[in-house]
Image: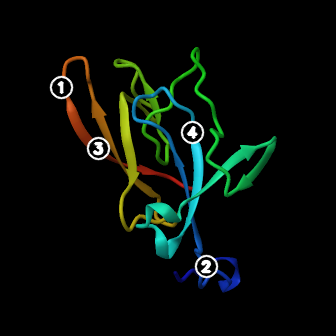
Amino acid sequence: MSRTSDGGTLSMWSRAWVYVFSTGFQRDKGIILRRVREDRITEPDAYIGWGSRDGQWNWGNPPTPALEHEPSAEKFGEMCVRPLRGSAWGEEGDGKVAQLYGPSIVPGSTLDDGLQLLVSQWKTDEGWPYRAMQFEVPVG
C-alpha cells in the first residue's frame, strides 16, 4: 500500500491480525470479538477469542459477548461499516435508508476519493422493493 500522506511514512502497513466482530443472524445474541492471523483466515481453528474467564478479559478465552443484546434496544443483525443510518419507510433522506441491509465497501474504494458503499434495501413485509444502491460518503 503506497501513500503520500504523513510525509511518506505510510508506504507499507503490516497486517498480522484480522479482527472479527460477529453475532447471530437471528438478532437475539450479543457481539463477540475474535482475531486470526491474516495468513490463516481460512482455518476455523486458528481464530482466537476475546473473552472473560474468572473476571479477567484475555485473548485465548472462549469468546464472551463484548456487547450484549438488550431486549428494549435495537437488536444486533448483520454487521459492516455503517456511515449511513437505517430509517423507517417514508423517513429516508440525509444519509438515512429505509430497511438498510448489508452495506459493504466497494472494492477499490479509497478514503482519498470518498468512500464508496453498496447498500441493499429490502421491504421485507411486501418482498419488494429489493435493490442495491451505490453511495459515496465524503471523508474529511
- Above or below — where is 32 with respect to 68? below
Residue 14: mark in rendering: 2
In the rendered structure, which disc, 4 or 2, sits on the residue that comes first in sequence?
2
Check disc 1 and report its element: helix, strand or loop: loop
- Mark 4 → mark 2, Cα distance in angstroms: 26 Å
- Mark 4 → mark 3, Cα distance in angstroms: 27 Å
Residue beneath label 4, please? Answer: 31
How far from the left and from the top, in percent, is residue 8?
Answer: 65, 85
> CB under 8 Å between callouts 2 and 1?
no
Seen at 29% across and 44% down, the residue is 133
In the rendered structure, which disc, 2 or 1, sits on the residue that comes first in sequence?
2
Q: How many marks?
A: 4
Check disc 3 and report its element: helix, strand or loop: strand
Seen at 59% across and 74% down, the residue is 16
- Mark 1 → mark 3, Cα distance in angstroms: 15 Å
**Which three-letter amino acid code belongs to the residue tagged 4?**
Ile
Of the two numbered discs 1 and 3 in the rendering, the one whose residue sits closer to the viewer: 1
Residue 21 versus residue 53: which sits nearer the camera?
Answer: 53
Q: Residue furthest top?
A: 72
Residue 128: mark in rendering: 1
**Which three-letter amino acid code belongs to the residue tagged 3?**
Met
Check disc 4 and report its element: helix, strand or loop: loop
In the rendered structure, which disc, 4 or 1, sits on the residue that comes first in sequence?
4
Of the two numbered discs 2 and 1 in the rendering, the one whose residue sits closer to the viewer: 2
Residue 118 versus residue 20: which sits nearer the camera?
Answer: 20
Q: Residues within 10 Å of mark 1 (few under 14, many from 20)?
A: few
How far from the left and from the top, in percent, is residue 46?
Answer: 52, 65
Residue beneath label 3, please? Answer: 133
- Above or below — where is 15 with respect to 91? below
